[in-house]
Image (tube, rainbow, N blue to C red):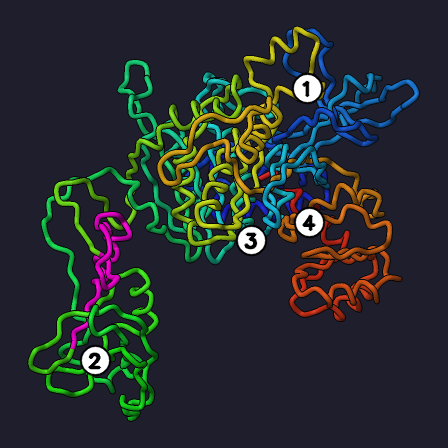
């Protein structure tokens, strides 16, 4: 069949299928699935096989009746994979530690269903079974705390999750849907060098479907990321190299058609990375997806290559009084206000408010004793206006960028001068510097002639020494976790600069990284918080995959995924978690003070650490009936706390029937409704109230009694429906 089906053909096919449905319903369903898959292919743009289903093994998850499982190879065998066949657990004998399993077989490569194959059942020991979650299956996640570090008093917690990132993103849709300010990801670059897995297999360079599998993996996650991002103002940042940048660009265009997208070239290896007989590569790329009103800031505008400044123009101080047309007081009444200054030094002491209405005489404003008042009086003696408002003038005064000028010897009127808007941008970018301050408090501005300068708006080519991934990624990581290696970590300062552009002005921003690897994004967010006192929080997600090179040795020792010694060598436990702990505490995993200092924007000893909090979690997979009957509250509790802002005390136990903490509350027993409502009303900071009830009427009655600013969430209906709705996404 052709790849693309036009509407006329599709209509005819639907008529034929409708007729077939009455005679051969099973065959009709199979054909409908095939037609649907073909119809989803695009006539133009990016076409690729979506490789349904994608699945993930869950070592360590307790086997339950009804689970899909694989049978692991015998311990000590060289094989790195379980039997590829999927089985359904139909019975468990706990006394014998065995399970009876029945094979499963997918009917069609594009089928949305997995059905039983009529084959003989078999018995397997429980320890040889590993649970498998296919991405079309509903999951009901929880979080289990595996440690925390607390040095930030009342600051929010950074959250670090050990999980398959597709399932973790589904989990965040319950806690953060539409509320994330920035997603920064550094996905696998699909080099063919065993840098990522699909269906528990490493993708090799000779895999004919390597690009298609990578695109399928990325599309599923980018669709979930889209729902996490704030549709009014947020940004998605994706780094990539030359192997997939073309396909990624098309995928982003198709996934985010309403957004504007830029690609940045960033030099990360100035000495060059070998590419065989090709030219050495020095750069990688960043795709910036602007959602809603998102824009790049100018705080780190010096990201672009340095350019020699060839201009010798002086810094201009312009007369503050408006000239020419539209220059009278009556033209802009709110720009007629007084300056009060010391007569001898000319220092501006105070800026008054606009004198309104326009008929009010300026003599009605009393000048403080010992000061001189300056109004915007035109050369003909009439009342004029200043070029900016009083609040804008006060901001310039705070920065030393407005000053008193010379007194006119004929009229006796003083001029007032200010720095032009164009030079303000150059001052912010570093092209103009403040060399000191004059006696009147005004800034002494200099333009660095012949030196290096930077433009005021970030450009799409970045070249900075601090972005060198070798020096400030690999080498810096060794300072925090000596003796431990992670392939190609990002420069801490490169990630910091990138985030500064987009969340520098958002001091409470939420930043998500679902390919967090060594934890650089969380580290960079903490750096930004220290620089401006922000309360930004990061959510980092990574699995606990053991490096391919280490797996063989561990298997030869008889170890398998899920064994404690195996899990200790995984990315989350061996790299991400200890790196973030070390960054906060200032100590390596063995308790030694970290040597060296942070460089560039904010220099201080790494051993100082950060006044931040972080908690580490493992994603769990819960049974929906146990959740609905309130028997797994301890696993759901962290999700409720994270949704409420991951701040303050967490409610981990509701045996008393209710509890209210700093920013949220939980009512589990409606007999305590009165006490709960009183506690919520007494705390204006409460943002969310969770009500546990199966009765819609009772839920509504409690919700109506709560303050209007409190979001009311029904448990466990809201939780369960979230994941049942999301379960179909893995089969896209």
Q: In what element is the residue under mark 1?
A: loop
The dot on residue 179 is 3
Nearest-to-viewer mark from 1 and 4: 4
Q: In what element is the residue under mark 2?
A: loop
Q: What residue did someone put label 2 on?
A: 376
The reply to whether the magenta stretch includes residue 154 is: no
Question: Residue 703's spot in the image, x, y percent?
Answer: 75, 66
Question: Residue 718's spot in the image, x, y percent?
Answer: 72, 53
The dot on residue 54 is none
* First reached walking from the N terminus: tag 3 or tag 1: 3
Nearer-the-camera pick, 35 or 725: 725
The residue that appears at 70% across and 49% down in the rendered structure is: 649
Nearest-to-viewer mark from 4 and 3: 4
Q: What residue did someone put label 1 on?
A: 561
Mark pair 3, 2: CA separation: 47 Å
Mark pair 1, 4: CA separation: 30 Å
Place residue 625 in its image quadrant: top right
Q: Residues within 10 Å of mark 4 (few under 14, many from 20)?
A: many
Residues tagged 1 and 4 counted as in contact (Cβ below 8 A): no
Q: Is residue 310 left or right of residue 170?
A: left
Mark pair 3, 1: CA separation: 35 Å
Nearest-to-viewer mark from 1 and 2: 2
Magenta stretch? 414-443
Question: Residue 25's spot in the image, x, y percent?
Answer: 72, 41
The dot on residue 641 is 4
Place residue 543 in its image quadrant: top right
Residues tagged 3 and 2 counted as in contact (Cβ below 8 A): no
Instruction: Decide if residue 167 is in sight here.
Output: no
Question: Residue 463's spot in the image, x, y percent?
Answer: 29, 34
Is residue 373 positioned above or below 635 on the image?
Answer: below
Mark pair 4, 3: CA separation: 15 Å
Instruction: Decide if residue 342 is in sight here.
Output: yes
């Amino acid at each position: 069949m052709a790849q693309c089906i036009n509407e006329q053909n599709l209509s005819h096919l639907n008529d034929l299928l409708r007729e077939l449905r009455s005679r051969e319903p099973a065959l009709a369903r199979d054909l409908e699935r095939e037609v649907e898959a073909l119809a989803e292919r695009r006539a133009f743009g990016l076409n690729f096989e979506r490789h349904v289903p994608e699945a993930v093994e869950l070592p360590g998850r307790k086997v339950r009746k009804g689970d899909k499982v694989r049978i692991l190879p015998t311990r000590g065998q060289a094989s790195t994979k379980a039997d590829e066949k999927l089985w359904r657990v139909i019975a468990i004998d706990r006394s014998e530690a065995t399970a009876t399993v029945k094979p499963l077989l997918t009917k069609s490569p594009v089928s949305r269903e997995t059905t039983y194959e009529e084959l003989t059942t078999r018995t397997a020991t429980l320890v040889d079974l590993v649970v498998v979650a296919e991405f079309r299956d509903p999951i009901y996640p929880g979080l289990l705390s595996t440690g925390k570090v607390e040095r930030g008093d009342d600051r929010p917690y950074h959250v670090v999750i050990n999980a398959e990132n597709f399932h973790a993103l589904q989990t965040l849709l319950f806690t953060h849907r539409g509320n994330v300010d920035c997603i920064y990801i550094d996905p696998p670059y699909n080099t063919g060098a065993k840098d990522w897995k699909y269906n528990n297999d490493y993708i090799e360079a000779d895999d004919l479907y390597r690009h298609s599998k990578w695109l399928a993996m990325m599309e599923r996650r980018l669709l979930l990321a889209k729902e996490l991002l704030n549709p009014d103002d947020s940004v998605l940042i994706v780094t990539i190299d030359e192997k997939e940048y073309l396909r990624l660009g098309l995928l982003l265009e198709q996934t985010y058609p309403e957004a504007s997208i830029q690609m940045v070239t960033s030099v990360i290896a100035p000495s060059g990375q070998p590419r065989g007989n090709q030219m050495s590569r020095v750069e990688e790329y960043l795709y910036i997806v602007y959602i809603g009103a998102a824009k790049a800031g100018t705080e780190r505008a010096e990201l672009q290559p340095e350019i020699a400044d060839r201009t010798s123009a002086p810094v201009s101080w312009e007369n503050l009084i408006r000239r020419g047309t539209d220059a009278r007081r009556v033209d802009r009444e709110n720009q007629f206000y007084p300056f009060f200054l010391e007569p001898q030094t000319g220092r501006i002491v105070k800026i008054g408010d606009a004198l309104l209405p326009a008929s009010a005489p300026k003599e009605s404003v009393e000048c403080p004793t010992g000061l001189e008042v300056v109004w915007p009086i035109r050369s003909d003696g009439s009342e004029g206006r200043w070029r900016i408002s009083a609040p804008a003038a006060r901001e310039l005064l705070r920065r030393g960028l407005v000053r008193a000028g010379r007194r006119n010897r004929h009229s006796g009127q003083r001029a007032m001068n200010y720095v032009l808007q164009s030079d303000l941008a150059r001052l912010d970018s570093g092209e103009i510097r403040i060399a000191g301050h004059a006696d009147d408090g005004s800034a002494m501005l200099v333009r660095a002639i012949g030196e290096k300068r930077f433009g005021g708006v970030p450009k799409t080519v970045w070249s900075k020494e601090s972005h060198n991934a070798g020096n400030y990624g690999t080498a810096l990581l060794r300072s925090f976790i000596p003796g431990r290696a992670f392939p190609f970590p990002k420069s801490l300062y490169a990630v910091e600069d990138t985030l500064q552009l987009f969340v520098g002005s958002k001091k409470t921003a939420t930043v998500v990284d679902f390919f967090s690897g060594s934890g650089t994004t969380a580290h960079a967010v903490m750096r930004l918080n220290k620089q401006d006192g922000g309360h930004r929080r990061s959510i980092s997600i990574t699995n606990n995959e053991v490096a391919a090179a280490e797996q063989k040795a561990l298997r030869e020792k008889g170890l398998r995924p899920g064994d404690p010694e195996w899990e200790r060598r995984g990315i989350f436990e061996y790299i991400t978690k200890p790196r973030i702990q070390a960054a906060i505490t200032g100590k390596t995993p063995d308790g030694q003070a970290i040597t060296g200092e942070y460089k560039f924007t904010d220099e201080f000893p790494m051993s100082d650490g950060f006044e931040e909090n972080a908690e580490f979690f493992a994603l769990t997979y819960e049974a929906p009936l146990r959740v609905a009957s309130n028997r797994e509250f301890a696993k759901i509790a962290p999700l409720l706390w994270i949704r409420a802002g991951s701040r303050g005390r967490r409610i981990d136990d509701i045996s008393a029937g209710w509890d209210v903490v700093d920013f949220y509350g939980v009512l589990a027993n409606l007999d305590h409704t009165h006490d709960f409502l009183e506690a919520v009303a007494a705390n204006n900071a409460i943002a969310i109230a969770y009500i546990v009830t199966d009765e819609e009427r009772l839920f509504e009655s409690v919700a109506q009694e709560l303050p209007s600013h409190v979001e009311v969430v029904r448990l466990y209906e809201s939780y369960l429906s979230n994941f049942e709705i999301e379960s179909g996404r893995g089969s896209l």
